[in-house]
Image: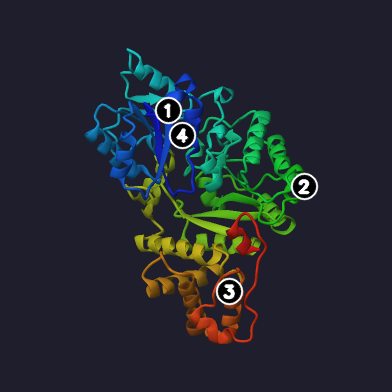
Amino acid sequence: MKQKHILLTTLNARYAHSAIGLRYLYANMQELQMDTIIQEFTINDQVQDIAERLLAQKPQIIGLGVYIWNVQQCAELVATLKKVSPSTVIILGGPEVSYSPMRINFDAADYIIQGEGDLAFYQLVKAIQSDLPPTERLIKAPLPAIEAIVMPYDFYTDEDVANRYIYVEASRGCPFQCEFCLSSLDEKVRNFDVNQFLNALDTLWQRGVRNYKFIDRTFNLNIKFATRLLDFFLSKDEDYFVHFEVIPDHFPEALRQRMSQFRPASLQLEIGIQTLNLEVAKNIHRNLKMDKIEQNIAFLEHETSAHMHLDLIVGLPGETLQSFGLGLNKLVNMSKAEIQIGILKKLAGTTLDRHDEMYGMVYSDVPPYDILRNDVLSFEDIQNMKRFARFWNLYYNSGNFKQSIVQLWSDGGVFENFFAFSLWVYAKSNSTWKISLERLALYLFEYRVQVQDASKEDVAAVLLADIMKLEGRKVPNFLKPFAQGLDVHRKIAKGQNKRQQRHL
């Protein structure tokens, strides 16, 4: 491989992810593109190995994308690179270096671009390579005109198409002011040219892309744009998977008609609820239109095959465990969708810190900057809820225990019963990670029988139906006595997304 003088790199959370930001930079390098290369790694790679591979190119300039999931490894990487090769110019960009306070030390970096760097990176590189490099280390990138940005989709490789998620965006920005979110800092929503974007999608389709993850913060804000995108996918006869983030209170008839046409396991919607406590929502500038939210979730639940992720956050200012529990109970009664439970994070640049004194908000100083305690939630409460969220994902959201898990709360509240179960499971496992499917099933079986006094035969029958709905699975050893004479080997329909299939 010919050596390149400009390297664009980042550490993805996992191999299956792809960095759309690097591809934007590459697409907009103009005449310098021939001297530029993208090299991606993951947070599980050894930092010194990454440094070795980067420096093997003998680069003049390295551009590094810094995010909340890789910021600590990036800091170590920058320090290593500068110790080994001090003359290599290192430019940082991304959300974790775009706002103050910057809580990780990046003093070793030569330049930091704050804001959208699509055009600013090229301009900085040009300046560095001239006789008049910038004297300012911190560069505030002006907001680029959306029509001036070259789209990045031609620069997904064949390997990306075959093995990675393909991220796309039809727009940038968010009109809302939710205080916990960096998107609240955006000045306005800007849409890419719809015809150019659809042409890019069609090119990706012709190359074999069947999984599309839209990173737009508010896909269903511009209805004319959204309907054209939905029509693009509805015109396809093959299986595919498309993911959108949507606001919960804006589903006019044009969207409803189209969303009702998507086949099962083809459409996924991430819907930001965050809290159902109207007072808490108002306090953090989150506008909740409960009547609209209830109507739209009911529509999506009963009149479409869309797979939904409904988001809730633990630790918002003023939100008690009881209040959170009421919200979870209500959501479970509204929908059988996945409910993603997150822990509040204090991101640099947001205005969330204005609540610190009044609500006693205390956060970790290391990524992901999650809340440790506040005036209504103790450190122990937060720790318990972190484990609650993890076990909720393993049992409820995974789809592996679709029928079994709801039996936990057949005679009471969802939150109350699952909270007690999560405490019991953690006491048994002393871990929330690397727990096999069989062990998870055994814990649920034992809890239902020993704690809730349920019939062994009844619990086993439902567990077998859940676990054996996927082709190729073996009957867990502890369930074999209950499986005799039963036809437990089943198949489910093929599709683009296994997790969605488990929910069908």
Which amino acid lies under the numbered mark 4 shown in the image of this protein? Leu
The answer to whether the residues at label 1 and label 2 have Cβ atoms under 8 Å apart is no
Nearest to the observer: residue 201 or residue 379: 201
Q: Earlier in the sequence, mark 2 or mark 3?
A: 2
Dot 1: what SS? strand
Disc count in the image? 4
The mark lying in front, picked from 4 and 2, is 4
Which amino acid lies under the numbered mark 1 shown in the image of this protein? Thr
Identify which residue is drawn at 68% across, 44% down: 250
Q: Which residue is mark 2?
A: 257
Q: Which residue is mark 4?
A: 22
Q: Earlier in the sequence, mark 1 or mark 3?
A: 1
Q: Which residue is mark 3?
A: 404
The image quadrant that residue 226 belongs to is: top right
In the rendered image, the residue lying farthest to the left is 83
Q: Earlier in the sequence, mark 4 or mark 2?
A: 4
Gap in angstroms between the C-alphas marked 4 and 1:
11 Å
Identify which residue is drawn at 31% across, 30% down: 58
In this rendering, the answer to whether 480 lies above or below 198 is below
The image quadrant that residue 304 belongs to is: bottom right
Tell me if mark 2 has few (under 14), some (14-19) or many (20+) residues whose alpha carbon lies within 10 angstroms of its own. some
Residue 182: x and y in percent read 47, 39
